[in-house]
Image (cartoon, helix red, strand yellow):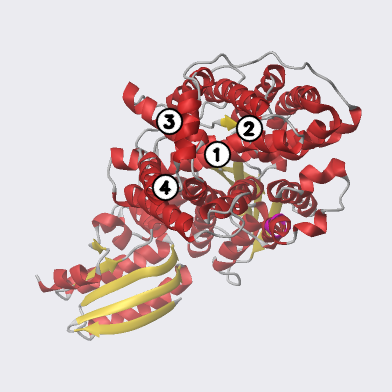
Amino acid sequence: MKIWEKRQGEIVILSVEGRLDATTGAAFEQQVAPMIEAGNKNILLDMAHLEYISSAALRRLLLLAKQAEDAGGRIALLEIQSSILEIFEMAGFTYLFPIYMDQEEALRSFVK
Amino acid sequence: MSVRKPSNLIYGVDDRPGPMMLILMGFQHISLMAIAFIFPIIIVEAIGGTSGQAARLISVAMLASGIGTILQGLKRGPVGSGYLCPLLNGPAFLTASLMAGKAGGFSLIFGMTAVAGCFEAVFSRLISRMRSVFPAEVTGTIVTMVGIEVIPIAIRKFLGVDKTHLVPDPTAIAVAVLTLGAMASFNVWGKGKLRLYSALLGMIVGYAAAAATGILNQESFRIIMETPMFSMPEIVHDGFSFQWVLLAPFLVAALSSALKTMGDVTTCQRINDADWKRPDMVNISGGVLACGIGNILSGMLGALGQSVSSSNIGLSIATGATSRRIAYSAGAILILMAFFPKVASIFVIMPTPIMGASMIFAVSFMILAGLQIILSRMIDSRKTFVIGISIIMGLSVEFVPELYHHVHPWLQPVFNSSLSLATISAIILNLFFRIGIARQATVSLKPGEDSSERIGSFMEQQGRAWGARGEVIYKAAAAMSEFYEAAVENDLTRDSVTMTAKFDEFNLDVEMAYAGLPIEFPASRPDAADILKNRNAALRLAGYMVKSLADRASVETREGRSCIHLHFNH
């Protein structure tokens, strides 16, 4: 798994590439949780290049979303591939995260 | 079995367009089929026949093609594929018919054509047992080559090259470009009926341009005027004869025709079913039987051998109209045209550049249909060789035809046709490269040492070797990874987990065996609050995901060992 970070104002855009499973999910949480603690509470996760996500990684994502929400922010998802979206739907996670296909629209949603 | 109509079709195979639409779309298909009227003329000229004999052959060809097209469209019973898949006197029998014509005249052509039709009919009964010989990469290669084979004829006609114009003619090219441009414009930017009739409208534009530029001249109009309005087709002919020496070339021609039909019917299946997964061999068998009966009929009536017209399938994709009722309409109009030669003459005088533009328009869709069939499955190096080498062998017939001039005359039909050579090559290479592909594979993972990523690589590799559908392999790998991670995280086992995947064309079954506790497959998933608070909820979510990803999931436990069975429909 690889993560690229860029900023758009107060929003952190994280592009995730590869697999998010039990092992890489833990590493992902270890990288993102301190960012939220440091005040970066609005995060846009670009999943265009994510190949696989397991339920163990989904749980990590849920923990991070809770942490961001408690800090007054949120985590939104961008460009989920159909195979990944199917896993989100199976797990019932599409109701827990706002999902966008357009980056501009996703960024505007943080301003509202 | 009902199928889901793809969104790009205006009239799907079971739809019922209105009567006027059926007539117009029938004529649209006939305008493309009319290009094949050139083949009877080639035969007659080669064996020194008269123009009267050529006219008779064309008239009987219309009758035989019309009946064959209707037979092919039949949905019930053993005969017919139920698709709009018109038959015509195509190039498949050209070489064999030329040999027969020179050796024994028309009676020998008709006799041998009827025998070839009998062979094709018998061959059709064996097809349903030959699934493994025709996997997606082989049928996709055949369909692609069906389109590619038409290119040399299409491009010559597009550039205005024929027996009286030996070099490209700028005026003809202008008419061809205008015709193709009109067809493509109506197809791309036209809505509804404009797209439905894009080929016919393009041809009308082409005829107008040909008349304005003098390509369609007084002589063309004279032919139409002098042709009688009504005339009975002459089905009484010189009789039948048979020569053993010609059996091989006619059987090879029949085989080529049958293989082409297989590719064409496969394309029809794919373009009419949004959820298409694999060729339906029983349906293909009916299609080849219709073609075989069409050839017996051609021989009896005194016409040349028939095969499916790939260009017309391309046309039906382009226009978004694949209703089998268009096949009945086109067939009926063809039969009527055999009695009304004046109507037929409008198509017979079709200027060469319009023919070329029409063929290029239709063939573009046919080639893409073949590539889509190939890419519907995962490809490994074995399949790359089957596809790549076969296409190279096929194209060699077009690029360096002189290399095959010295092949034994019996084998000429194979080496004269890029489609035939590519098809034979794909079938042989597919059978050869099946050596060493195990239908079952096992991987063993040790908790704490191996990550679930290894499962992804293992299934990817096996999926390519099996030529499986990518989405099924993805789901299986996801379910296996999900289970393995849950087993490790929740200490269901500390021992190795042995995963065995078994594959055939319809099923993918996975067994995961280990010493330890079984996983639960709950009926409902835990909610978010539960997942956050309760560690056991994460295990239940994993069990729910494994069960949901598979089409069937079960678990058995015996003497401290557990075994998970997952089934995936393929």
Q: Earlier in the sequence, mark 1 or mark 4?
A: 1
B450 left or right, relative to B104:
left
Of the numbered discs 3 and 1, the one sitting upstream in the chain is 3
- Quadrant of image for the C terminus of chain B: top right
Residue extent of the magenta highlight: B390-394
Note whether residue B165 is visible.
Answer: yes
Q: Residues within 10 Å of mark 3 (few under 14, many from 20)?
A: many
Q: Are marks 3 and 1 in contact (CB under 8 Å)?
A: no
Q: Are marks 2 and 4 on the same chain?
A: yes
Q: Which residue is mark 1?
A: B35
Give coordinates of residue B103: x percent, y percent. Answer: 86, 32
Extreme left residue here? A112
Closer-to-camera residue (B339/B513): B339
Q: Is residue B191 left or right of residue B143?
A: left
Q: Which residue is mark 2?
A: B89
Q: Report, in whole angstroms, how far the alpha carbon at label 3 lies from the one at label 4.
A: 20 Å
Q: Position of residue B503 (x, y in %)?
A: 65, 46
From the image, tell me which residue sits under label 4. B210
Q: Main secondary structure of the magenta part?
A: helix
Instruction: Identify the element where label 1 is drawn.
Output: helix
**Mark 2 vs mark 4, CA separation in Å:** 26 Å
Label 2 is placed on what type of residue? Answer: Asn
**To which quarter of the image does residue B178 belong?**
bottom left
Marked residue nearer the N-terminal end (2 or 4)? 2
Disc 4 residue type?
A: Ala
